Amino acid sequence: MKKIAIALLLTVCLNGFSQNEKKEIQDFKKNEIKVNALYLILGAFDATYERAINEESSVGSSVTFLLDKEGDINTAFAISPYYRFYFGGKPVSGFFMEGFSLYQKVNRNTTYYTYDPTLGYSTRKDYEEKVSAFALGIGLGGKWYTKRNVMFEISAGIGRNLSISSNVPDTDYSRITGKFGITVGYRF
């Protein structure tokens, strides 16, 4: 009887210990907001919200606006939802791989010259080219946290524009696109 009581007591204690350990792992902070410092230096604002699904994966979306409107681009906007899978020892941190989609909208001033053989000279036309593009891609990166939940991330991704629409025929908008980041943020 004494052996049965000890075995039962050990089972209850181990079961209680394993539940506490599991609870600690599941109670990590699952939301984060972040800003891409690299894009700020380059003249754009890129903000991201990410939500952990579990300890190894998350979903998120970033929104980008062009801040520096000098040059031929006068409006630029992008939105990029993504899914990430993490390989680190801590919840949603360490090395990750991601799959992303990217929708971009760009308005830029473009000048086209067309040669007219009957007139014997070229004519100049100025357009405001409006381009929309949708891409799918993959990316890699790493994410680290401090004890106070401040986050640092480095990432890069490359994708292919699957759909490009433009109001100017024969646009020179690239088929390849990418996204890069040196990002800081906060987990809550």
Image (cartoon, rainbow, N blue to C red):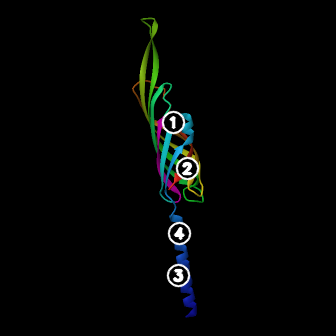
* Circle nearer the viewer, 1 or 2: 1
Q: Which mark is residue 12?
A: 3
**Disc 2 crowd, CA 10 A, few/some/many (<14, 14-19, 20+):** some
Label 3 amino acid? Val
Q: Circle 4 sits on which residue?
A: 22
**Viewer-proximal residue among 97 and 44:** 44
Is residue 62 part of the magenta span, yes or no? yes
The residues colored magenta run 55-66
Q: CA distance from mark 1 to mark 4?
A: 42 Å
Q: Are marks 3 and 4 in contact (CB under 8 Å)?
A: no
* Circle nearer the viewer, 1 or 3: 1
Q: Residue at x 53, y 81 (%)?
A: 12
Q: Circle 2 sits on which residue?
A: 97
* Circle nearer the viewer, 3 or 2: 3
Q: Please report whichever mark, 3 or 2, sits nearer to the chain's N-terminal start.
A: 3
Q: CA distance from mark 1 to mark 3?
A: 57 Å
Q: Secondary structure at mark 3?
A: helix
Q: CA distance from mark 3 to mark 4?
A: 15 Å
Q: CA distance from mark 3 to mark 2?
A: 40 Å
Q: Circle 1 sits on which residue?
A: 44
Q: Please report whichever mark, 3 or 4, sits nearer to the chain's N-terminal start.
A: 3
